[in-house]
Amino acid sequence: LYYYTLLPPTEIKDLMDRHQRQSEKRYPHTKLAELLTQLVHGPEGLDLATKATKMLYGSNELSEAEWIKQLSNLNESEMLAIFSQARYTRMLFTPGISIMEFALKIGCFNREKDAQRIISAGGFSINQVKRTNIEELLINGVHVLPNNLTLVRVGKKNYFIVEWTMY
């Protein structure tokens, strides 16, 4: 921090003291990463990187409501930037569609048997919340976020973004 930043020595000392008390929080590391990201990518890049970190490495202990709130705060371009490897699909929202039908429609699985097995085993998440009931129906405001997007994850690394058109 002394070599790579222009932070005042008192602030560096404060960060190091906090690190001594709670080393798992990695305060100095985080501050250095923030400063370098802002230097290279600007304030917008730092904001996007912070959001991406929360989405990709956020706590598994967040409730469904907290995940919905965080994901709802993202616009389409931010969601696409954070989940750049995600397959993007547009769909017309039709009430009464089950999770299994939805997963098959967006191409998460090739066969119905695979979908049943993986969803039931807990390898399928909608908006960062595991879904294990293949008969659960999609609900606007829970599965479809207020920004008309849905984030689907199959396994650990396969993401799908669905943009919904409401009729």
Image (cartoon, grey):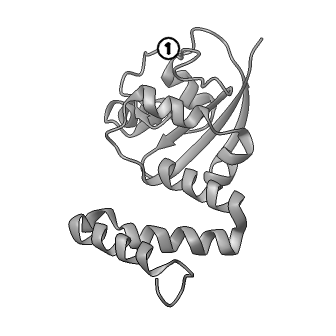
Quick check: can you spot residue 141?
yes
Residue nearest the observer in this picture, 26 or 78: 26
Residue 46 x, y percent position in the rendering:
63, 61
Q: Nearer the viewer, residue 113 or 87?
A: 87
149 sits to left or right of 135: right
- Asked if 6 appears above or below 118 in the picture, the reply is below
Residue in the picture at 31% in, 39% down = 61
Instruction: Tell me the SS state at disc 1.
Output: loop
For the C terminus, give its image quadrant. top right
Crowdedness near tag 1: few (<14), some (14–19) or many (≥20) residues, C-alpha within 10 Å: some
Q: Image height check: is 153 above or below 120? A: below
Question: In this view of the protein, which residue sits in the foreground, 4 or 149?
Answer: 4
| Residue 85, visible in the rendered structure | no
Q: Is residue 52 above or below residue 165?
A: below
Taking 66 as reference, is 39 left or right? right
Q: Amino acid under label 1?
A: Leu
Give coordinates of residue 83: x percent, y percent.
61, 51
Percent position of residue 154, x then y: 47, 43
Residue at 34% across / 43% down in the picture? Answer: 60
Point out the residue furthest to the bottom here.
3
- Could you say where residue 73 lies in the image, as x and y percent from the top left? 61, 35
Going by the image, does 165 lie left or right of 46? right
Q: Residue at x 54, y 30 (%)?
A: 103
Nearer-the-camera pick, 103 or 113: 103
Task: Identify the residue at horizontal 72%, vertical 40% (top origin).
Answer: 76
Where is mark 1, residue-wise? Answer: 137
Q: How many marks?
A: 1
